[in-house]
Amino acid sequence: MMACRLSSSAAAYLLALQLCGCAAEPATTALAVASSRPYLGVQMRAVEFPPSVANGGVTSGVQMDLLPPGGSSQEAGLREGDIVLLAGGRAVSTAEALVETVQANGAGKPMIWVYLRDGQRRETVVTPRLRGAAVDQILAEHVITRIAEEESLGDSLAAAGQRVTAFSHYVRALQLLYYSPARGDTESRGNSLLTRMVLVRPPQLLIPGEAQRHRARAQTITESARSQADHERARAAFVEALYHAPWLADLWRSAGLAAEKANDAEGARRYLRRALMLNPEGPDSETLRQHLSTLGPARTR
């Protein structure tokens, strides 16, 4: 995440652009600019997992989070959720490491990627190519399409009484919303998805390991925080945990308090309101409402 005053979704979107070799400027200025750097056409994030025979004892990799059509990764047969372990014979445990490896390899040169899919180890050949001028537009359109697909599936399944499956599609839509370039309606659409997610939320949910990992990291940062920048780092870690478990009200609450300490009252209001949306009658709900009132009204956009 970036430490500037962006919404969590906008920050994740710009970070993803940087990690896949795109320009970090707004899409309106980047659309017409090609690049001499290799381009994979994928949004990704680092993940950790228990060692196993299938992954050769490796405990971290890079998850393919979003693959717009026409990208090198998508054309190599990779899918959303695949976890890359090796690229060109080099272990990659972070998105930055994968980008560095690809850039060192160069465009037009095939490289073998080893990845996990459904717990099974696989290989494919990826040939990175130069980034074209229309990449940002393709990405933006694909993100919007994928969000709409997951949202529609969630609505259809909820109407059919398939609550658990509907819940998973709403969660996926919320995850994809992190990459949405349509920043103006990101908050309202996120609130709408959260509301529908609550209606079909199963009574017992396991907290994903990645959510637990990022929450623990955020709590560690918070405990030793000495500056506004530290609290911004804590907020970013809580937001990363929320990507994996957006149904946890306590994560929204923690992100809100961290945002407040990072001097971002608007972000604090947004996160704390979502904590209340998810748990309106919780033991600290009245305290949160009172605290929200001290943050003042939201800014007019």
Image: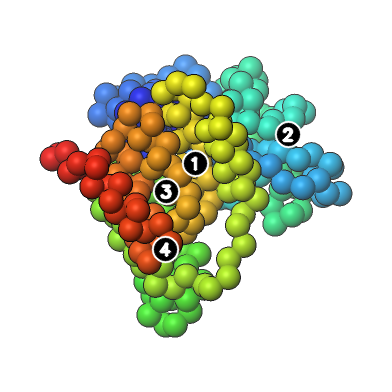
Kindly check if marks 2 and 4 are in contact, taking CB atoms under 8 A apart as contact. no
N-terminal of the pair, mark 2 or mark 4, is: 2
Q: Secondary structure at mark 3?
A: helix
Q: Nearer the viewer, mark 4 or mark 3?
A: 4
Amino acid identity at mark 1: Phe
- Which image quarter: residue 113? top right
The residue carrying mark 1 is 238
Q: Is residue 293 left or right of residue 287?
A: left
Which residue corresponds to the image point at 53% horizontal and 45% vertical from the top-left?
Answer: 241
Q: Secondary structure at mark 1?
A: helix
Of labels 4 and 3, earlier in sequence is 3
Using the numbered discs, state the Cα–Cα distance from disc 3 to disc 1 in whole angstroms.
9 Å
Count of numbered circles on the image:
4
Q: Residue at x 33, y 23 (%)?
A: 25
Q: Count neighbours of disc 2 (C-alpha within 10 A) and say few if under 14, some if 14 to 19, many if 20 or more.
A: many
Q: For residue 276, say whether it is visible.
A: no
Label 4 to label 3: alpha-carbon separation: 12 Å
The residue that mark 4 highlights is 282
Residue at mark 1 to residue at mark 2: CA–CA distance:
28 Å
Q: Position of residue 42 (x, y in %)?
A: 51, 38
Q: Earlier in the sequence, mark 3 or mark 2?
A: 2
Tell which residue pokes out farthest to the left in this image: 300
Amino acid at the residue labelled 4: Gly
Foreground label between 2 and 4: 4
The residue carrying mark 2 is 86
State the SS at label 4: loop
Three-letter code for the amino acid on which mark 2 is drawn: Leu
Residue receiving disc 3: 253
The span from disc 4 to disc 1 (Cα, nearest Å) is 20 Å
Gap between marks 3 and 2, in whole Å? 37 Å
Tell me the SS state at disc 2.
strand
Q: Earlier in the sequence, mark 3 or mark 1?
A: 1
